[in-house]
Image (spheres, rainbow, N blue to C red):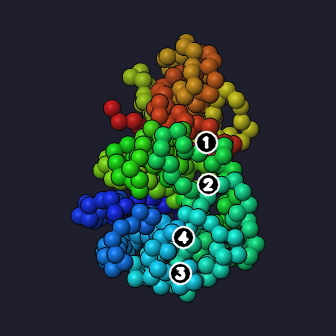
């Protein structure tokens, strides 16, 4: 599935004009999905329709897919039924995220709704929920999965649990989504807002690193900023990431030479399939640059996790092979040319046998 970036809007807590500007900016940068919460509505039904409809109309003009977060309590407040979803056609949304689940049979039936709305399921439970729904012959193209976000610090999902939950959905070949947290956003559905990530360990990471990690798992198709509003800088950085392979930021040593920088930055790297625990090896580059000299420098140090190494002139057939250190070691036949940026170190475990990866120069 093609991978997408998304943003979140909270019409009952945000400024309408700022919402419009946010939608426009994100659209220009390639964002194509909106999570919109209906869980904390206030006011009468007509005013709710008008407020949400105005935003969804703009979103549709900008080619967003809009998913609305709902619960049974909201249906009661609005006096509408799960048996007739025409109310949501008035709003102009593309789908409903069910904050609470039913018995499986109900969700499967909902996926055949006359309005052709996507039914998005809560992914943040490691139970056979989705398998039960699919066993009732759900309309698979109209079933998505989306994790929760967690406003309270310390309550987000641990990574191992997250992967177990996510695999249940990917094994059913369903579109999946999860949330990352802006470090600038202060708006969410509730008064407590310590950020809005799915993964607790990522709560304070730069937003682009969180997104890279989500995509790197191979389990998440849509990455959504949970809180509003992300800064322009965050939106720009997210728009620049490669959604299909990890792109590490590299901080070069001043002594690194032209050939080393070219090897690092100007090539598609592939980890060898017969892996080693000590280093990640990208070996095709040594063939391409076999005739290029590479004198020794910074080769007597103990290399550390995340160091980027290139074989020097003393390394025979391995000259100009690129390696990334995973364990401390010494080898004077390798030059230390740079290091992976500190925040990107969390991405190294996702480089598996035959993984593709690239490097970009970190901004000073």
What residue is shown with label 3?
81
Mark toward the viewer: 4 or 2? 4
What residue is shown with label 1?
158
Q: Compared to 35, does 185 lie above or below?
A: above
Which quadrant is the N terminus positioned in? bottom right
The quarter of the picture where residue 221 lies is: bottom right
Q: Residue at x 57, y 25 (%)?
A: 305
| Callout 3 crowding tier (Cα within 10 Å): few <14, some 14–19, many ≥20 | few
| Callout 2 crowding tier (Cα within 10 Å): few <14, some 14–19, many ≥20 | many
Mark 4, secondary structure of its residue: helix
Residues at discs 1 and 2 in contact (Cβ within 8 Å): no
What residue is shown with label 2?
124
Mark 2, secondary structure of its residue: loop
Cα distance between the residues tagged 4 and 1: 28 Å
| Callout 1 crowding tier (Cα within 10 Å): few <14, some 14–19, many ≥20 | some
Mark toward the viewer: 1 or 3? 3
Q: Earlier in the sequence, mark 4 or mark 1?
A: 4
Q: Residue at x 33, y 32 (%)?
A: 364
Cα distance between the residues tagged 1 and 2: 11 Å
């Amino acid at each position: 599935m093609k991978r997408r970036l998304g943003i979140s809007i909270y019409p009952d807590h945000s400024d309408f004009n700022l919402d419009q500007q946010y939608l426009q900016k994100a659209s220009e940068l390639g964002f194509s999905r909106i999570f919109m919460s209906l869980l904390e509505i206030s006011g009468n039904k007509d005013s709710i329709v008008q407020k949400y409809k105005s935003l969804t109309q703009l979103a549709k003009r900008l080619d967003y897919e809009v998913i609305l977060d709902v619960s049974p309590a909201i249906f009661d407040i609005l006096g509408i039924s799960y048996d007739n979803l025409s109310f949501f056609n008035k709003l102009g949304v593309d789908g409903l995220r069910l904050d609470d689940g039913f018995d499986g049979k109900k969700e499967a039936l909902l996926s055949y709704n006359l309005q052709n709305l996507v039914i998005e399921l809560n992914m943040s439970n490691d139970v056979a929920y989705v398998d039960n729904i699919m066993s009732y012959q759900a309309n698979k193209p109209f079933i998505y999965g989306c994790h929760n976000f967690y406003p309270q610090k310390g309550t987000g999902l641990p990574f191992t649990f997250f992967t177990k939950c996510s695999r249940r959905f990917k094994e059913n070949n369903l579109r999946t989504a999860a949330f990352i947290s802006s470090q600038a956003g202060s708006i969410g559905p509730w008064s407590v807002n310590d950020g809005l990530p799915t993964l607790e360990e990522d709560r304070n990471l730069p937003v682009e690193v969180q997104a890279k990690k989500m995509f790197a798992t191979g389990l998440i198709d849509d990455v959504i900023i949970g809180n509003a509003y992300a800064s322009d800088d965050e939106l720009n950085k997210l728009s620049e990431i490669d959604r299909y392979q990890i792109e590490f930021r590299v901080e070069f040593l001043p002594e690194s030479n032209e050939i080393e920088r070219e090897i690092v930055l100007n090539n598609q790297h592939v980890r060898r399939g017969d892996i080693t625990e000590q280093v990640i090896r990208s070996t095709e580059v040594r063939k391409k640059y076999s005739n290029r000299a590479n004198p020794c420098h910074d080769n007597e140090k103990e290399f550390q996790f995340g160091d980027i190494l290139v074989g020097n002139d003393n390394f025979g057939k391995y000259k100009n092979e690129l390696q990334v250190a995973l364990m401390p070691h010494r080898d004077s036949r390798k030059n230390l040319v740079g290091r992976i940026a500190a925040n990107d170190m969390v991405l190294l475990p996702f480089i598996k046998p035959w993984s593709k990866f690239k490097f970009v120069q970190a901004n000073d």
